[in-house]
Image (cartoon, grey):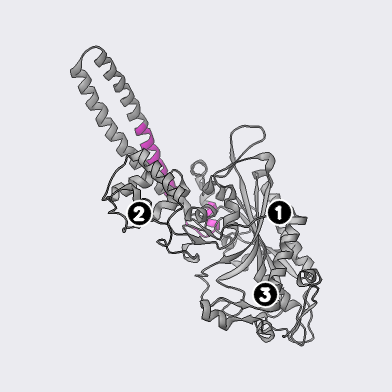
Amino acid sequence: MHDIKAIRDNPDFFDMGLARRGLSPMAADLLAIDAEKREYMQKLQDAQAVRNEISKGVGEAIKAGDKVTADELKSQVSSLKDLIASGEARQRRLNQKLTDALALIPNIPLGEVPNGENESDNVEVRRWGEATNFPFPPRQHFDLGEWLGLMDFETAAKLAGARFVVLKGQLARLERALASFMLDLHTTNSGYTEHIVPLLVRDSTLYGTGQLPKFEEDLFFTDPRSKDFETDTIQQIQARVKSTLGEGGGPFTRARVDQIIDAVANNAASAFMFSNIRETEDWGNQASLDAWPPPLRFGLIPTAEVSLTNLVREQILEETKLPLRFTAWTPCFRAEAGAAGRDTRGMIRQHQFSKVELVSITTPEQSREELERMTGCAEEVLKRLGLHYRVVKLCAGDMGFASRMTYDIEVWLPGQNAFREISSCSVCGEFQARRMEARYKPADGKGTRYVHTLNGSGLAVGRTLIAVLENYQNADGSVTIPDVLRPYMGGQDRITRP
């Protein structure tokens, strides 16, 4: 989320940043909404000041026994009260309109990010290792996995459809071994704290890291009518609505729905969380607020970045505790809505895959250095596995929505004769922190500031399995297990056909 004050102070810088991402100027439209909202704020302040002044006059008239004047002034106060209520509703709508517009705009690239439109404009930073020279034509991972009888796409398609796989026996253990190795390395050598996190999260959580609202089609959701909120959450919301609006009753008009949402949604994230209620029709005729709110959906996480980064949402941290470094191994779920026809064979692009995620929460002064550190932690996994890779700096047009700067790590796959992405490490600045209301208190004790967030894959476990299979394959179809993984494989040194 962008700071409208920063846009107001330097609209040209904002529009130039958008231009680097291939987007049209937006500052003028945003500032027009902002100006209208601020104008209403001033009108409300003026009206409230007049109301307060007249209210004093009511008291003085009553004290003087002047009932006629008192009644006239009361009438004026009542009219101003209605005007102020109407103005406050208009101000909330303008504020939501501005928030909704800002929520769809990607982060501004750092100055050192190269210009460009797509992956062909990315800049290689470094390489490590050498590609293996095979005395035979190397196979792709799916050919190896199916020949070994340990990678089953046909059965997975019967169970769930395309872009799923069933791993069996030694390959299932190899995936678990890879994840355990990565977690041990990151927690023991690199200072990350391991977490087990929710795989199902609320819309507001997905909003916090930037997946919603822009990338809804890339996510999987539960049925919004399948479960209610937890009882305590319902009671808290009902109490807040009733204390603000009174007990109320039904049927609820559209204006009543908007009024309830405005009462509950006290920040951008919760406003988005409840926005889908505006489109809900099946609860509108309930007789009382006791039936409110209607059930809301949950989303499957596309990456543990969502859960890990939101661990600090709506908190004020102490600067002395930063940086915080989190890691988790989770399944990830992606609809791959824009990937039709791409990587249709094999495990490169799946609806469900596992990944070890790295997340850092830092101060603004630490964040750029933390990006280098995080990227190095991800690289260390590949170095210890002896896998040839390169690091590229993404151009402005190829970066993710929330990123200010991204390094991609691409591993060499001899079966494809190509480098393929195995990790992306990004610094997001305060972009996500604003959406999550995540702040820290500086050591000097003066005010609060937004934290900076970073995330990276350390690594994508399925793609690492692919890289091991292709780089350690033998002419007879067996696969040598890298030395660092053998303790996790019970001392086994080779994967062979059962």
Is residue 295 found left or right of 448 in the rendered image? left
What segment is highlighted magenta in the picture?
A: 16-44
| Secondary structure under the numbered disc 2 in the rendered image | helix
Crowding at label 1, few (<14), some or many (≥20) Cα neighbours within 10 Å? many
Residue that carries the numbered disc 1 in the rendered image: 192
Residue 4 image offset from top left, x and y in percent: 48, 44
Which quarter shows the C terminus? Answer: bottom right
Q: Position of residue 482 (x, y in %)?
A: 79, 73
Where does residue 183 sit, x and y in percent of width and height? 71, 61
For label 1, the SS is: loop
Dot 2 or dot 3, earlier in sequence: 3
Sooner in the amino-acid sequence: mark 1 or mark 2: 1
Q: Is residue 37 magenta?
A: yes
Residue placed furthest toward the top: 64
Picture layout, residue 130 above or below residue 29: below
Outermost residue, left side: 68
- Residue under circle 2? 278
Query: Residue drawn at (65%, 55%), measured in percent from left and top?
Result: 195
- Mark identifier at residue 212: none
Given residues 237 and 28, the one toward you in this image is 237
| Inter-mark Cα distance, 1 to 3 | 25 Å
Q: Nearer the viewer, residue 402 or 176?
A: 176
Where on the picture, by quarter, is residue 469?
A: bottom right
Q: Specify whether residue 236 is in view.
A: yes
- Quick one: label 2, few (<14), some, or many (20+) residues within 10 Å? few
Q: Earlier in the sequence, mark 1 or mark 3?
A: 3
Quickly name the residue at label 3: 172
Q: Are marks 1 and 2 in contact (CB under 8 Å)?
A: no
